[in-house]
């Protein structure tokens, strides 16, 4: 699965509308990204570049967070309650805004 991802994920294919950075104030999607720290799936440098390039600026674009709780990449195995709380906050932000 990882080898397939590496061969197929080569460039950004999303439009500015999807990223939420187009000139419109009503984006197609409201995205949240939750990155792990020292995660073997996404290098620290790559993660920081993604956040700098595509993260929220001036109220536009997806909100991107770096985990400060030390959760593993496979958070769903033992940390689902913590993640459920985080996702609940994200959903409330989408619904209430």
Image (tube, rainbow, N blue to C red):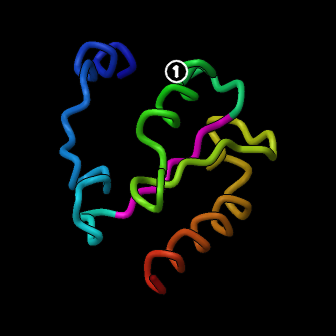
**SS at badge 1:** helix
Residue 34 falls inside the magenta stretch: yes
Locate residue 22 relative to residue 82 in the image: left or right.
left
Residue 73 to residue 81: above or below:
above
Instruction: In this rendered view, identify the residue nearer to me: 51 or 80.
Output: 51
Q: Quadrant of residue 95?
A: bottom left
Q: Which residue appears at 50% of the width and 74% of the height?
A: 91
Q: Which residues are magenta?
A: 30-36
Locate residue 45 relative to residue 59 in the image: left or right.
right
Residue 97 falls inside the magenta stretch: no
Quick one: quadrant of the C terminus? bottom left
Q: How many marks?
A: 1
Quick one: quadrant of the N terminus? top left
Q: Quadrant of residue 31?
A: bottom left
Residue bearing the label numbered 1: 46
Q: Quadrant of residue 4?
A: top left
């Amino acid at each position: 699965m990882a080898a397939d991802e590496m061969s197929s994920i080569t460039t950004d294919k999303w439009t500015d509308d999807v990223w939420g950075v187009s000139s419109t104030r009503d984006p197609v999607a409201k995205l949240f990204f939750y990155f792990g720290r020292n995660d073997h799936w996404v290098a620290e440098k790559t993660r920081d570049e993604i956040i700098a390039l595509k993260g929220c600026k001036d109220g536009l674009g997806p909100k991107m967070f770096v985990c400060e709780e030390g959760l593993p990449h496979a958070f769903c195995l033992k940390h689902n309650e913590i993640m459920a709380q985080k996702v609940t906050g994200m959903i409330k932000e989408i619904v209430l805004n």
